[in-house]
């Protein structure tokens, strides 16, 4: 599945302490994230990009052929477009170096959360992806998800978010 270039919001500058729900698909939707070694290699580079660009990783979930992230800018100069570019660039470079494979499709998807979107509710929606996809019966059994900020129990105690 090849995606067309999604449009950024024309009236929004993507700077500052905003929250974003991001999805990156693997190249040709290959089922890449099936082992700890592969998911951990990419996750480490996402965390590196988050530190470099002033973002917190509020939730993440590596599905076999894509990844969901919930990130939040931590400063007035936190730039989501720069974070996305850095996260994909670092992870793709290191992934190719280790595994010899191309990692990402060119474009991803983003949703800027509104102020009334509950952070933990969106995080719960993200970590419940493996259950909705039938990969596990209990979220706690899926190894490739989490948060750098919240415990899994804090996320699962949240009221469910419903994507539009």
Image: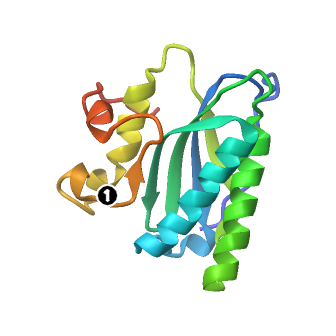
Where 153 sits versus 95, above or below? above
Q: Is residue 156 visible?
A: yes
Where 115 sits versus 155, above or below? above
Residue at figure coordinates x 63%, y 41% from the top left = 110
Residue at figure coordinates x 77%, y 41% from the top left = 81
In this picture the colour scheme is rainbow
Farthest residue, direction top: 116
Farthest residue, direction bottom: 100
Residue at figure coordinates x 41%, y 74% from the top left = 35
Tell me residue 13's x, y (percent). 81, 26
**Label 1: few (<14), some or many (≥20) within 10 Å?**
few
Tell me residue 36's x, y (percent). 42, 70
Residue 56, picture quadrant: top right
With 56 as the anchor, is 97 left or right in this view? right
Q: Secondary structure at mark 1?
A: loop
Residue bearing mark 1: 133
With 14 as the anchor, is 147 left or right in this view? left
Quarter containing the N terminus: bottom right
Where 91 sits versus 11, above or below? below
Farthest residue, direction left: 137
Tell me residue 38's x, y (percent). 50, 72
Closer-to-camera residue (23/71): 71
Residue at figure coordinates x 67%, y 43% from the top left = 51
Number of numbered discs overlaid on the protein picture? 1
Tell me residue 158's x, y (percent). 30, 26
Where 124 sits versus 10, above or below? below
């Amino acid at each position: 599945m090849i995606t067309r270039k999604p449009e950024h919001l024309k009236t929004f500058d993507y700077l500052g302490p905003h929250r974003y729900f991001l999805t990156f698909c693997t190249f040709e939707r290959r089922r890449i994230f099936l082992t700890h070694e592969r998911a951990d290699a990419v996750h480490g580079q996402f965390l590196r990009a988050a530190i470099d660009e002033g973002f917190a990783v509020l939730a993440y979930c590596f599905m076999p052929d894509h990844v969901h992230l919930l990130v939040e800018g931590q400063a007035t100069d936190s730039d989501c477009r720069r974070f996305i570019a850095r996260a994909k660039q670092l992870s793709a470079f290191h992934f190719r170096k280790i595994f010899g494979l191309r990692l990402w499709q060119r474009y991803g998807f983003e949703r800027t959360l509104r102020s009334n979107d509950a952070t933990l509710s969106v995080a719960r929606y993200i970590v419940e992806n493996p259950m909705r996809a039938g990969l596990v019966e209990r979220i706690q059994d899926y190894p490739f998800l989490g948060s750098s900020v919240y415990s899994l129990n804090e996320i699962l105690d949240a009221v469910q978010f419903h994507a539009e």
